[in-house]
Image (cartoon, helix red, strand yellow):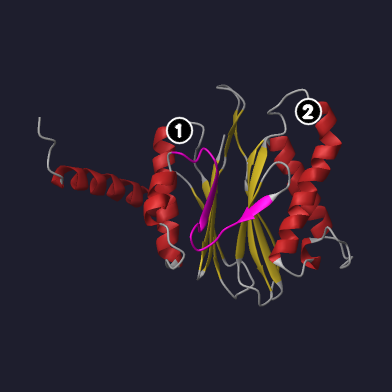
Amino acid sequence: MTYCVGMLLDEGLVMAADTRTNAGLDSVGKFKKLHCWSNPGKGVFTLLTAGNLAVTQAVVSLLSEHASSKNSKDPDNLFAAKTMFQAARIVGRAIRAVRKIEGEQLGAKADAFSASFIFGGQIGKEVPRLFQIYTEGNFIEATPDTPFFQIGEHKYGKPILDRVARNDMKLGDAAKMVLVSFDSTLRSNLTVGLPIDMLTYEAGTLKFEHTKRIGPDDPYFKMLSTEWSKALRNAFSQIEAFDI
């Protein structure tokens, strides 16, 4: 399985994904699930993927092939999109194209084509935008009221996001919160595992400058995990006991 989080802020975007995949207890691997395409100064796009690995890799490969094309009029080239809405529709078409190619062979199994995506970025002077895109290729967009999306094993990391996430957070605080969400998930679900790929994007820069792979020996993540556990225990001990 996997866990991915995308958050839309006034200051930009925070995107993160684990790297563990498993097809049974004895078939565990590591694959990148955070993907980026950029044309510095013009447009940047990032995609988080969860679900059937063959399907998500096919979608990413299809997008990459079109994005590398020199044909600026190619309707499926992300860099030909004038708005992020148009770019999200391109991702949706890529998903449907893969379904058309592979769907007949996978159709007998209801979950075989299961895949979900979080897509974000910025084009020109348009503000950054964030979308959750479903298996069918349709999507919803993040708003100030709901500034984050999760895909994969999201239930363990959701409480901290529900309580703390706001669109006016600083990028550094949002990244810290997302990592706390991952720490909670890692403790409760063995199908999610390190390393974590994280990207923080500052609105208006139109280039990716801050990406990091966080492994088991990362000093900040180790510190955060320890301090969060301490803070929870301290908060619990300070609440008056239930009167029995």
User: Which stretch appears magenta?
Assistant: 139-155
Q: Position of residue 112 (x, y in %)?
A: 71, 29
Q: Residue at x 43, y 60 (%)?
A: 174
Indicate yes or no whether the magenta region holds residue 143: yes
User: Would residue 219 be visible to someone looking at this image?
Assistant: no
**What is the x, y in percent for residue 6?**
54, 54
Would you call the spot at circle 2 few (<14 residues within 10 Å), some (14-19), or many (20 or more)? few
Callout 2 touching callout 1 (CB < 8 Å): no
Number of the label disc, if any, that sits on residue 39 = none
From the viewer's perspective, tell me whether residue 49 is left or right of residue 243. Answer: right
Q: How much space separates mark 2 and mark 1, taking CA atoms?
A: 28 Å
User: Vertically, is 83 above or below 178?
Assistant: below
Which residue has dot 1 on it?
Answer: 189
Could you tell me the amino acid type at mark 1? Answer: Asn
User: Given the image, on which type of amino acid does mark 2 rest?
Assistant: Leu
Q: How many marks?
A: 2
Residue 57 at what x, y percent from top left? 73, 42
Mark 1 neighbour density, 10 Å: few (under 14) some (14–19) many (20 or more): some
Identify the residue shown where x is 43% and y is 62%: 166
On the image, numbered disc 2 is attached to which residue?
Answer: 106
Which element is circle 1 on? loop
Image height check: is 64 above or below 59?
A: below
Q: Would you say residue 198 sits in the magenta stretch?
A: no
* Residue 240 shows in this picture: yes
- Name the N-terminal-most of marks 2 and 1: 2
In this rendering, would 101 be left or right of 60? right
Give the label, 2 or 1, closer to the camera: 2
Residue occupying the far left of the picture = 244
Check the picture and name the quadrant holding the N terminus: top right
Q: Quadrant of residue 175?
A: bottom left
Q: Secondary structure at mark 2?
A: helix
Q: Position of residue 100 (x, y in %)?
A: 84, 38
